[in-house]
Image (tube, rainbow, N blue to C red):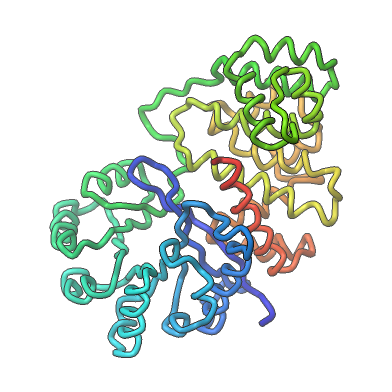
Amino acid sequence: MHQTNFIVREPLLDPKQRVIGYELSWQHHAGETPSDAELESLIGFVAEHVNDEDDGWLLRDKILFLDAVPGMLSTDALHQMPPERTVLTLKASDLDDPDTLAAVQGLRAGGVGISLRDGDLLNLRGTIARSASYVEVRFSGADVAAQARTYAALKQASVRMVGRPVTTWADFDACAALGLDAFVGKLHLTPRPGIPVKGMNPAQTIILQLMQMVQNNEDIPKIEGVLKRDPALSYKLLRFINTAGFGAGREIQSLRQAITMLGYAPLYRWLTLLLATASTSGYSPVLMETAVVRGRLAELLGQKILGRGEGENLFVCGMFSLLDRLLGLPMKEVLETIQLPDEVVRALLTRGGMYGPYLALAEACELNSNLVSSLAASLAISPEDVNKMHLQALAWAQNVTA
């Protein structure tokens, strides 16, 4: 089937704000609801691109929640997905059909997760206990007591609860207090109130200095001298070099050798990733993972037209687009701390210039808006290619953040 839909992803957070998985859904190019046949094709596409014949499940410990319709329950592609990492989200009313209910119970017996939405949870208690592993709670902060009663009734059914949409940190905390297991929403893009904005910590200051030196092609001994000022950073670089197999069988113990073997462009990329992970601004792990996926996706989207040589700059655009939040500083202030190419600065401030549209498209894949379609069309990238690159970036990020 010719693809006209785009995959949109939303992170699923646990009560500690860690990413336990992603909800993937089709977004129709014209803003309409995708047909059942189109929804059925989602599972096949995802299975093909995140479950590798040799390497297995590319998303490591992440669970995927997929929008589903009854027709999807019998599709062959479902058998290519690891059952313990797959959750199909159905409407509660779908289970009124005896055949659908039987299919759901068969899948549950085989380990596939089933999540139900849009139902009267209390009336569904018996059905849920027999057929669902998750139930979606439409959370509103209005009547927490009623939420608690509903939740207590369901808790006996050993069903996990997913709250959505969770739009404020107050709602998040209320959900966590009620014992919900996972949360969907755009919360990670909002600062958590009460957590002091710290700006840059000493580790980040050194990382930025090193990035500047690499950009200016400073001599390796000078770079080594700065690295030596931070033992933790030196240790991380040596560990990275040795686990990534650069030493080809022999352990590399000197920083100078490590920098030489890695090379300036890969060293710059590694430092960019490190800058995000060194954040102490009270942001959750989801923000870091979003930055990594966004950086890699922007890079992949731009490679075809702009060429591989622009990859580093595209990657930096994606990573740095969340750096203001990771550092707790306004973007203008962040950009004053490091010299970046003019085109990268333009992309970060206005989404304009050579790189801006690719960054904007990578961001749009995280939002349920009609922007994805128009941005992809303006860059002449087909829905299928955007979707492939999206899943590739998601898989790549799991390895990096691990």
Q: Where is residue 324, by image quadrant?
A: top right
Q: Is residue 84 above or below residue 197?
A: below
Mark count = 0
| Residue placed most toward the observer, 237 or 288 | 237
Residue 144 rendering spot, x and y as whole percentages: 19, 51
Quadrant of the image for the N terminus? bottom right
Q: Front-most of 325 and 64?
A: 64
x, y (%) of residue 118? Answer: 31, 71
Left or right of residue 101: residue 57 = right
| Residue at the extreme front of the image, as rendered | 249
Residue 264 in which image quadrant: top right
Q: Position of residue 259 (x, y in %)?
A: 77, 23
Task: Quadrant for the C terminus, please.
Answer: top right
In the rendered image, the vertical position of residue 24 relative to residue 145, given as above or below: below
Q: Picture coordinates of residue 371 (x, y %)?
A: 63, 60
Q: Residue at 30%, 52% (x, y): give it.
A: 181
Between 131 and 17, the one nearer to me in the picture: 131
Specify whether 5 is left or right of 198: right
Q: Looking at the image, is 164 positioned above or below residue 234?
A: below
Q: Residue at x 65, y 56 (%)?
A: 392
> Seen in the image, is 24 located left or right of residue 341?
left
Which residue shows up at 19% across the image and 56% down it? Answer: 147
185 displayed left or right of 309: left
